């Protein structure tokens, strides 16, 4: 194994010094991180999980919300159900709801978390059925009506990392599939999170020419959705980001396939991806 030079060791120290003001700024603050199913399906998730654990050990209070889109689709196809989406939301019949529960509550290993929370625990997420979208009944798809922050905060106070699955409990006692980006935004608002980070399998939001948008406000986002530039699964991501921003959480969409992109966004001067702002620039 080659010996590390003194210059390389100094560079490592400089990296730590650069991170110090950000560690101080976010120490004790809640950081909600949404790990998208697409990102986890297309990248090695070990660096992401290492990042989350590191944030906890330097004094932050990370909360992980996970989705499982590709896994759910794969299981649907395996049992002969064709995945269907309307405006980025999965049409969820009763068999698909059972698949979603299996995937979303069994995806993350118990070795790194206290427990996996879902709307059926406590419940953490109370939801109402979503109305028809574009004239189509989405089935067991819900909108978050209320986040019960108490069980999440209890795990944080124990020094552990909560992991929340995007399954909500309806007032009718039935389980509903909720878009994980939406869940992450509502959790961020309920916990008064300093930041919401949406990890996905793209490097951010792009404009009509395909250029990455580094900063995006609500007015421009609405125009891009209305004109069809922002489409499909990016629509609920952008809407979730704007909801969290309106609730007081700085919000970013970044590429979870890039090793340690979470640390690059939080602990360096120059972030990555798209940052949402409350003013036009």
Image (cartoon, grey):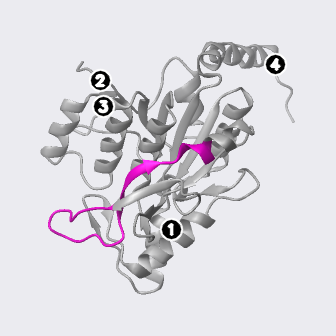
Badge 4 marks a residue whose secondary structure is loop
Q: What is the C-alpha distance between the residues marked 1 and 4?
A: 44 Å
Q: What is the C-alpha distance between the residues marked 2 and 4?
A: 45 Å
Badge 3 marks a residue whose secondary structure is loop
Residue 80's quadrant in the figure?
Answer: bottom left
Residue shown at the point (48%, 58%) measured from the top left? 166
Residues at discs 1 and 2 in contact (Cβ within 8 Å): no
**196 to 248, vertically: above or below:** below
Residue matched to label 2? 278
Q: Position of residue 136 (x, y in %)?
A: 19, 70
Nearest to N terminus: mark 1 or mark 2: 1
Residue 12 is a magenta residue: no
Residue matched to label 1? 71
Residue matched to label 4? 5
Image: magenta residue range: 129-152
Residue 213 circle label:
3
Nearest to N terminus: mark 1 or mark 4: 4
Q: Position of residue 160 (x, y in %)?
A: 72, 42
Which is more toward the observer, 221 or 15?
221
Nearer to us: label 1 or label 2: 2
């Amino acid at each position: 194994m080659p010996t590390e030079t003194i210059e390389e060791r100094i560079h490592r120290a400089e990296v730590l010094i650069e991170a110090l003001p950000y560690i101080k700024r976010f120490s004790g603050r809640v950081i909600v991180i949404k790990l998208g199913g697409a990102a986890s399906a297309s990248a090695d998730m070990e660096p992401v999980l290492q990042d989350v654990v590191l944030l906890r050990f330097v004094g932050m209070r990370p909360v992980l919300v996970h989705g499982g889109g590709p896994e759910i689709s794969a299981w649907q196809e395996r049992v002969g159900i064709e995945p269907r989406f309307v405006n980025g939301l999965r049409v969820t019949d009763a068999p698909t709801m059972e698949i979603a529960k299996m995937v979303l509550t069994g995806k993350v290993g118990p070795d790194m978390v206290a427990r996996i929370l879902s709307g059926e625990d406590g419940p953490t997420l109370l939801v109402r059925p979503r109305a028809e979208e574009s004239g189509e009944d989405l089935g067991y798809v819900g909108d978050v009506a209320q986040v019960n922050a108490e069980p999440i905060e209890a795990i944080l106070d124990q020094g552990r990392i909560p992991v929340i699955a995007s399954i909500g409990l309806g007032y009718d006692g039935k389980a509903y599939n909720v878009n994980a980006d939406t869940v992450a935004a509502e959790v961020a608002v309920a916990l008064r999170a300093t930041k919401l980070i949406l990890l996905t399998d793209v490097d951010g939001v792009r404009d009509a020419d395909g250029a990455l948008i580094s900063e995006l406000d609500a007015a421009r986002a609405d125009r891009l959705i209305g004109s069809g530039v922002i489409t499909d699964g990016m629509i609920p991501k952008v809407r979730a980001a704007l909801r969290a921003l309106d609730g007081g959480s700085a919000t970013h969409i970044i590429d979870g396939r890039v090793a340690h992109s979470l640390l690059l966004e939080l602990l360096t001067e120059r972030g990555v991806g798209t940052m949402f702002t409350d003013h036009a620039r």
